Amino acid sequence: MNKVTRWVRYNLRYFGQPPWDTGVSPPELIRFLQSAPPGKALDMGCGTGTNLVNMASYGWQVVGIDLAWISVIKSRTKLNQAGVRGRVIHGDVSAGVHPGKEFDLVLDIGCYHDLHPRERSAYQANLANWLKPGGYFLLYAHRKKAVADLHGLAEDDFVQLSDFLCCQWREDSVERRPDGGGGHPSTWAAFMRCENDDQAKSLSVTGEG
Ligand SMILES: C[S@@+](CC[C@H](N)C(=O)[O-])C[C@H]1O[C@@H](n2cnc3c(N)ncnc32)[C@H](O)[C@@H]1O
């Protein structure tokens, strides 16, 4: 999907209630927040801000980025209504956007998997720039159903991310749907930014493809 199509599509989706916008943070994020000391968190493709609010409620200083203006407005409203502080930037995570640096946590739930391969390289460069050594990258993504698919995460993505990140854990499963049915093959993974990039290259990703 090209950038313009994606921009139109997401803005249109946010006029209504898209299926991913459940208003509830996933247990994988909550477990992380319960176990890690608060710091600075960046939410890539923050949607309507549910995860920003939850991270802020655990004491995190939060910044969100989203391509869709409507989700930016909804996120800012949600933060205000919850009475928590946070910054929400309208921008493209795979382009020149400046959320700050030295994040202890970068979260991506459902944004990376929609990027074109060219945009993924730019995203990775941004991520390497924004995440501090020792910081975590928590990723939820659909996996590709077929090699030729543009949508979804491939094993190559793990190899590229492992240039500067060390995989801490990974769970391959199937998307949870509100109706209880089976959805898209999906993956949760937590990475840590290595203290130096040679360390990342010396480690391999765990789990199966
Ligand atoms: C599937 S939604 C998930 C939203 C949110 N993370 C959640 O869990 O509810 C993907 C989000 O990524 C945003 N997005 C897609 N491509 C983006 C890009 N290149 N830069 C910034 N945001 C993007 C969309 O506007 C949308 O809000």
Image: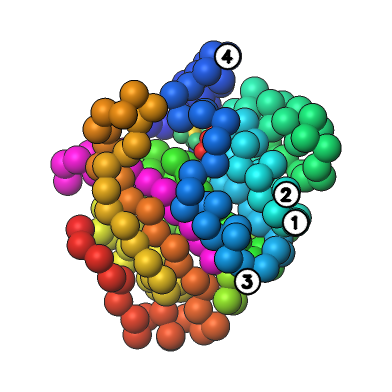
Q: Quadrant of the N terminus?
A: top left
Residue at figure coordinates x 35%, y 30% from the top left: 177
Q: What is the spatial separation of the Cα atoms under label 2 and label 3, in whole angstroms? A: 19 Å
Give the label, 1 or 4, closer to the camera.
Answer: 1
| Disc 1 target residue | 59
Tag 2: residue type?
Ala
Assign a secondary structure to mark 1.
loop
Q: Residue at x 43, y 85 (%)?
A: 199
Labels 2 & 1 near each other (Cβ < 8 A): yes
Select label 2 or label 3 by which is in front.
2
Out of 166 and 126, give the one closest to the viewer.
166
Q: CA distance from mark 3 to mark 1?
A: 18 Å
Proximity of marks 3 and 1: CB atoms separated by less than 8 Å: no
> Circle 2 — which element?
helix
What amino acid is at disc 1? Gly
Q: For the stretch drawn in magenta, what is the main secondary structure? A: loop
Q: Which residues lie in the magenta part? A: 136-153
Amino acid type at mark 4: Phe
The answer to whether 208 is drawn above or below residue 18 in the figure is below
Please identify the quarter of the rendering in which residue 202 is found. Answer: bottom left
Mark sitting on residue 56: 2
Residue behind mark 3: 132
Question: Which element type, helix, strand or loop, lies under badge 4?
Answer: helix
* Residues at circles 3 and 4 in contact by the CB criterion of under 8 Å: no
Which numbered marker is on residue 15? 4
Identity, as a three-letter code, of the amino acid under mark 3: Lys
Residue 49 drawn at (x, y percent): 64, 36
Q: Percent x, y for residue 209?
A: 20, 58
> Which mark is first along the chain, 3 or 2?
2
Mark 3 nearby-residue class (10 Å; few <14, some 14–19, many ≥20): many
